[in-house]
Every structure is written in C-alpha cells, then in structure tokens.
Image: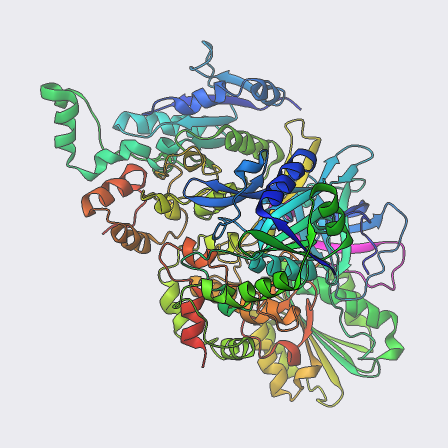
Amino acid sequence: MTAKTLSKENFKKFAENLVKSERTIGVKAKETKYEFGNINNADEIVMDYDVTLRSPRTFFQPPKEKLFDFKLGANTEIKPNIEADPFVLLGIHSYDLKALNQMDIIWDENNADQHYKARRNAATVIALEPTQASEWSFWGSMDSSTVDKGYDLLLTDIGNKYYVEVGTEKGANLLSKYASAEDATNDDNTARDKVRSELPNLCKADRKVKCDTDGITASMKNSYNNAIWEKLAEKCYSCGSCNLVCPTCYCFDVKDTIELDLATGQRTRKWDGCLLEPFAKVAGDENFRENRADRFRHRILRKTVYVADKLNGELACVGCGRCSSTCLPDITDPVKILNELCS
Amino acid sequence: MSKPKIAFFDFAGCEGDQLTVVNLEEALLDVLEHVEIVSFREAMKEHSDDYDIAFIEGSCTRVADEARLKDIRKNAKIVVAIGACATSGGINALKNIRPLETVRKEVYGENWKDYDTYRARGIGEVIDVDYKVYGCPMTQSEFVKVVKSLLTGTQPDIPNYPMCVDCKQAGNVCVFEKGQTCVGPITRAGCDACCVTEGATCWGCRGLVNDPNVDAHKEVLEKYNLSVDELTKRMATYFTNELPKG
Amino acid sequence: MATAMNDKSLYAPVIATIEEAKMLTTTEKYFKLKLNNGNELGHKPGQFVEVSVLGIGEAPISISSSPTQKGYFELVVRNAGNVTGALHKLEAGSTVGIRGPFGTNFPYEETKGRDILFVAGGLGLAPARSFINYVLDNRGDYKDVTILFGAKSPTERFFTDELKKISEMKDVNLLETVDNGDASWTGNTGVITTLFSKINPNPNTTSCVVVGPPIMYKFVIAEAKKKDITDDNIIVSLERNMKCGVGKCGHCQINNLYCCQDGPVFTLAEVGQIPEAF
C-alpha cells in the first residue's frame, strides 16, 4: 500500500488526537522499565524504549480472562464473554508484531478461538521499528527487525520524521482522520531503507544467534538427550517467569469460581507456563513432566521445533530477550543455549 | 440441611487472621448465609464446643497447647489452619534457630523458668489438618475460597508454583532489577504478589512452594551481594520449619 | 467438528442431563447422558468429551458407549479429583456441561475384515468398551475378536454383567485376570501380560488395541511385539491433562503432539519413537 511521512511534530498531534478519541494503548515508563498500558495523556507515550516488561499479548490474551458466566438452576444459563472494545495499540516493536502474527495463526488453526479473535479484530496496530535494543535483545539475528505484515500502520523513525507504511485501509483511515501526513518522497524511501538495514546492528555484538532457522530446528531435534538440559535445570526455580514474559507463550489454565450464593459464577482462563510443576499433572497425581529438566527442555523445543512446525518452520522465538533478562539464575538465555547446541 | 457450625481458635499469634475474617464485612454476611459461628473470641462473647469446622490461628509453642489442639481435633470434623503461624510456625519459628534457653532468658528475663515454652510449630505437626490457608496474614480472598471449597466439598485450588508467577501476571518490575532482593522465587504464590505490587519485597509469608530450589536461590542471592548472614535471616523469617535440614 | 459446542465460545459447554447413574465399583461411577438440545453426540469409538460441573471445573472423560447406541452416551468416571468427585455426587436428573466429542478415534473402519485383540487394564475398559461394543454390534465386519481384561482385584472389575454376557458369546474370546485374587475369584491371577501366553494372534491379520494405566503400556506393547504384531497395528489411547480439548491450552502435549487433537488414539508407529509418550 501507500507510504507517508509524519513530522515528529505532526506525530505528536496525531498521538494527542488518538488519545483524545480512541482507547489507546502505548508504551509508558514503569519504574526503571517500560510497560504497555492505557494512555490518558500523549505525553506519557515513550517511543524510544528498548523493550517492555511484558509482551503486548496482555491485550490479546489477558493474564486472567473470563470465558463465560454461568447461573445454576432448573435452566442452567451459560453466557460466553467475548470482550472486544476497539483499541489502538501504538508502538509495538517489530519482533513483538512478528510474535503477534504467529499467535494469529496459532489461535486460528483447527479451532478458531473467538475470544482472541474478537480482541485481535478490535485492535488497530501501529507498529514501530525499534530505535533501541535492550542489553538482552537478539532480534537482530532472529529475522525480527522488520515485519512485512500484521500492522495497520508501521512507523520507522528516520530522524526528524516518521516514515509511515500504510498496511490496511483501517490504518489509512486512522491516519487521515487524526493526522496530516505527507506522501513519502524518494528521499524518504531511501532514508527508511537505510534505517532498516542498520536495525539488526542495534542489538549488541555478542547478542547473536549464529545458526539460521533450519540449522536451529535441526540441531534442537538432535539435542533431546543432550546433558545441557539437566545441567541448566539444576538451577531452575520452575517459576515460569520465562513463559510469562514470552510473546509466543500462550498456554493457559482454566478455573471455575463460584460466588458465595453457590449459584452463579464464572469460568476463567489464566496464563500458565510449562515450566510450572503442576502443568502436566492429571487428577490422581500422575505428572507427565515431573522433572525440572524435562520441563525446561520442553519450552526451548516448543520455540524451536514444536510450535515452529505449526508456523511453517518459522521459529517461535523472536529474540526479544525478555526471558533472558527475567531469569534470575541466568539459565534460560536462548542465545547461549542455541549457540551451544547449534552445529 | 442445617448450617455447619464453625468455631475460631487462637494459639501463639497476633490474631491478624481472625481480624481478616472480621474485616470481610459484607462478604462475611454472605458466608453467614451458609454457616453458623458458635465461637469466635475476636468478634463475640458466646462459646460452644459443638462445632463441625475449626479454624485455628497461631502456632503451638507450649506443652499445654498440644492438649488443647487435640481436644479441638476431637470435636471438629474438619480442621483448618489459618495463617503462617498455624500452617508452618510463622515468624514464631524464628526462635527455633537459637538455643531455647537463650531465647527464654531474652524474652522473660530472670523469671524465664516460670514461662513454659518450646519449639514453635505449625499445628499440623501436632494434629491432622484438613486445609491450610497460607499467608501472614492470610488474604480475604483465599479464606473465602477455602470456605467455598468446604461448602462444595472440594479441595481448594492453592497454587503450587513460585511467587514469580503472580508478579509477572501483575506486571511488576522484578525487585532484583531494582537492586533489592526477595524470596519470591521459592515462595508459594497465591496472594497476587501484593507486597511487591505495593512496592515492598516478598518475605515468603506463604511458606515454601513444594520442591523449592533453595540452593539455586542461595546462589542467586549471593550473586546479588546478599551476605550469608542477611541471607540466613531472610530465609529464616518464614521458612525455619520448612527448610530442608542441614 | 464437535456437535456439543456453544457457537459463541469454544470453551462454553452445552447442557446434558444424567438419565441414569450408578456406582460400578467403590471408585467408578457410570453415567448415561443425553444432550438437552436433543442432538446425538455423534462421536466415534475412542473419542472423549469435556465434562463440566459448573462452579467446580471441567475434566476430560472418554466416551464408554458405542455410537451404535442412539439417543444417549455413556461415561465411566473414576473419583480422582475435584470435578470427578463432584460428578460422583450427581444422580439421575442432574445436569452437567458437555463439550465435544474431541480427539482421534479407534480405527473402526480401517480394521474391518481384521482380527481385533483388545487389551484393557483397569479403567481402560471404559474407552475400550466404545470400540468393543461397536465391534459386537457389527460382528460380521470383523474376524476373530479377543478381549484381555485385567483388574487389580475382583472388586475393581466393572461392567461385570456385560463381561459375563461376552464370556458366553461363542465368537468372542474373553480372557480375564486380576493382579490379586480373593476367596471369590476362581479365574486367572497375575498382571495382564500373563494372558498373552494363552493367545496366538495372527500377526498378519491382527490389530491390537491397548488401553490402560500409564505403567501398563510398555509391558503390553512388548508382549504384542513378541507376537510379531507390527507398530501400525498396535493402537493405544493415551491419557494426559487435556484441559481445553481444542489444541490451545498446551497441557496435554506429548513432545510435539497434542494428545487432545492428534490423540488420544495413536498407533505405535506414530508414538513409538516419541520420547514422552510412554
């Protein structure tokens, strides 16, 4: 589709208009870090962040989500809860958008999940190519610096202005409604291409996965019985932090709650993680993944083999580095694991 | 069907858990739709020994406590330990890491021999306990959850994973990122990481998660420059009776 | 596609009424159910449903009846947790939530014209029964039928009336054993693998269906292999934490396989080399 530009000044106005008229979710400072949240004032928006604490999956698969209400009685009632308030997601980095594109496939395949779909359809995605990398980021070597789909608008900071790639009509409408954008010139195109080509270098030199995708998947398939899993998992808390910050983790647990009237209640789903001890347990106490090392290995194999298989071979690790930074014993960093196991 | 009769009892503790029950306010009225309270020193004068469910707060710290606990066990069909003191000994168990005589002298001075006391224990070390409500104090929501389990005859869903899960769900910045330390990675989740969410750190009042990786956490705490002395204190606050010996 | 589904949410059940409920053993309860919307469940032998007791939760339960039975379906539920415990308190007239049917089925079409060897351990008889009864209702479509059933003790046997009827059938060979007998038990004692010495399946024409507790598989599979039955003719049904039933929640994964979608019925050729399968 078409390409536009927005001066930084015009972008500010665009953001102000957005915040005034649309439910806008963007990146804000949170203590020493950044986090996606509701934007009430355009001044809160941070565009030059490195990475957010949690991935934007929070807005498509909330940490805790009501699936339906029920009312017991002669005629039991079940009322599905499909929440879909329209919102604008502003400033999602390329690697997170890549993950979101993958989740679109996962939630849709075989049995389409209406809860996810409703939220995804309610979103207008304004993606942003990163201008900073965290000390743990390695998206530069995971083919995640730029993404060619999934956005309604895609912003690239080319100095004094944003290059705006219009991905959909929804994006075009939003832009024309709230901003005065100019058509991109040849110079703008050249500037954007230059910024793009430099993007991978934003990640630190030592944050590179050395193998290509096929090499990684093949090596990981062969590493099932490698001693590395036992060795690393010795220090694993089984705390699931790596799962919960990951943009491509989507496993969930389902729970019922009943009110004190013992007649009404809800069924909810909640983020879960395959690192947690009860994850593969069944009633009667059989645990099909009882060892820490088996759970530890399962997550890495999901990202590189099992889920990748559902994504036509695309790795379900986008290199955001969140798991690496959140793991206190520092055992789960994919860069170290993949580089050690890849041949 | 008549309402089950419930009674509250306190042993060594601050009564913070019973206060949590009183503070339920409107939810307490909903609870009272289903149960009849026959004994609750914190909230009423009457007392009866005819009860089905006993909620016990506080730890066992004296020989005399044992007989009283066994009496309650005999009277009750179901015994519920509420709060850290009752579930694991709580901070009372801090005294267990030092020689008893030293502790008794320190607290009671020269008359220390007049005051009978011994190792502080969770009540589960003395009598069979059917349900445990963790925390210091327990949270209102978990207490209500356990009450609902009692009413529906199910096992309450008490998490068996570390606090980090609650922190991530809440979107907290990890306290280690802020140059502080906590024992959340080995502590049983279930409180929505309320302390960290409010800007404090986790002291482990819900006790150790099953199969905690204590060694890994000791290494991490050392890596974050916590001295061995500080580390021992931190671990002792709520875990004294739960930590693997040695 | 599953028939018992709410069209708004994958996770919302439809209501079914318990028409009959009775204890089979001290821990197993039988339920005969009918969907309130009047639809047939439309399952195939070997599939499962997610059963809800609203307010308590949901559990995957294999369907015990053959689709040749119309108008209702049957479940056998072991009391092993909150949901199944709550189910055990329900009697005829009560309602439950149902989603499904889900998962793969026993190869009832592909095995027509073949010999079928059923090997069921304990509660494994419940899912196996969906296929056994299908075969009995279409007896002419299959050749030799052998059923091996092992229980821990005589009191843990269930569907005993049906077993008795089957034992009287001339065209079915039923062999039973219990791990530990008692005064009333005059049959075989010993684990289920001991029954293999009493049979001589033709490896070229036999399909072997194995359902039982996790521990049982590798021993039974070894026996079946000793009889030269090939991996693609050894069929197993695996148990996992199939929480959502629709391939999303991740709990039932067996390495790359989703037990709720790719299974629960697999051939040994499919899962024999999968490290987490057995």
Residue B204 in magenta? no
Q: Is residue A114 visible?
A: yes
* Picture coordinates of residue C205, whole percent (x, y): 76, 87
The residue sitting at 52% across, 52% down in the picture is A244
The residue sitting at 51% across, 76% down in the picture is A216
Q: Residue C244 versus residue C91: which sits nearer the camera?
A: C244
Q: Residue A49 versus residue B56: which sits nearer the camera?
A: A49
Residue C78 in magenta? yes
Q: Quadrant of the N terminus of chain B?
A: top right
C29 with respect to B54 (left or right): right
B18 with respect to C118 (left or right): left
Task: Determine the residue located farthest toward the top in the rendered image.
Answer: B45
Q: What residue span does the magenta drawing correspond to?
A: C62-84
The residue sitting at 86% across, 75% down in the picture is C139
Q: Using the image, determine if residue B9 lies above or below residue A289.
A: above
* Picture coordinates of residue A255, whole percent (x, y): 62, 44
B41 with respect to B232 (left or right): right
A329 with respect to A208 (left or right): left
* Picture coordinates of residue C233, whole percent (x, y): 71, 82
Report the colour scheme: rainbow
